Structure formats: structure tokens, C-alpha cells
Amino acid sequence: MHRAVRQAVVQDTGKMRRDHIDDTRRLRSDVHGLRSLVRAMRDNQHRHQQQTDPLVQELQKQNAELRQANELLIEQNKLLIEQNNLHLLQLEKGKQQIENTKQQLEQGKQQLEKSMQMLSRPSN
């Protein structure tokens, strides 16, 4: 019986050892596969980055140009607003001058009417 137990232990130990070796082989294979996958992902990412970098740079360049153009348009709009305000002031002055001229014409008309009345009166 002692011998049977010992033989069973040896068999179990051998089986465990073979299982351990098989597990180790599978793990090594899995690690190798994962390393290959990581390498492929890095290569793909690098390739993708090389392809997109020029596009990103071009878009950044265009964005900077658009910002500069936008700033110029903003400045131009400010100048146009200032110019419009000056024109409004000139129009207001012109309107005031027209009002003054109307008043002067009205006064001139009244003076002319008075003069006409005085001239048309018979002198005594």
C-alpha cells in the first residue's frame, strides 16, 4: 500500500509537472502574441501619426491665417463704425444748418413782407 501511494504521488507530481510545462508554453505563446500585437499597434499608430501630422500642420496653418484675417476684419469693422459715427455727426450738423437756413429764410420772408407793406402804403 505504501508503494501504491508513492506511485500515485509520483504520477500526480508528473501530471502536475506536465500541466505546469503546458501552461508555461501557453503563457509564453500568449505573451509572444501580445508583444506582436503591441508592436503592430505601435507601428500602426506611428504610421497614422505620420499621415495625420502634415494634415494637422496644414489645418493649424490655415487656422492661424483665418484668425489673422478675422482680426483684420474686426479692425476694419471698428474703423467703419467710427467712420459711420462721423458721417452721422456731419448729417446732424447739416440738418441743423438746414434748420438755421429755414429760420433765416422765414425771417427774411417776414422782413420782405414788412418792407413790401411799407412800400405799398400810400405816403401822406
Image: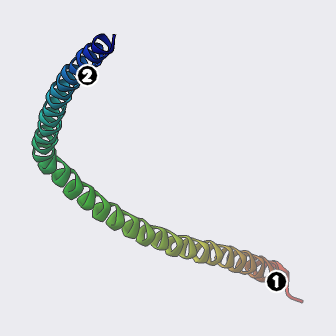
4 to the left or right of 93: left
Quadrant, the C terminus: bottom right
Residue at position x 75%, y 80% from top? 107
Disc 1 residue type? Met
Which numbered disc, 1 or 2, marks the residue that appears first in the sequence? 2
Q: Quadrant of residue 115?
A: bottom right
**Residue at far bottom of view:** 124
14 to the left or right of 9: left
**Residue at far right of view:** 124
Helix, strand or loop at disc 2? helix
**From the viewer's perspective, is residue 83 above or below residue 114?**
above
Helix, strand or loop at disc 1? helix
Foreground of the two, 21 or 75: 21
Which mark, residue 15? none
User: Label 1: few (<14), some or many (≥20) within 10 Å?
Assistant: few
Foreground of the two, 44 or 100: 44
Which mark, residue 118? 1
Residue at position x 11%, y 43% from top? 51
Residue at position x 12%, y 39% from top? 39
Residue at position x 65%, y 76% from top? 96
Residue assigned mark 2: 13
Foreground of the two, 99 or 83: 83
Q: Quadrant of residue 1?
A: top left
Percent x, y of residue 54:
12, 50
Percent x, y of residue 29:
14, 27
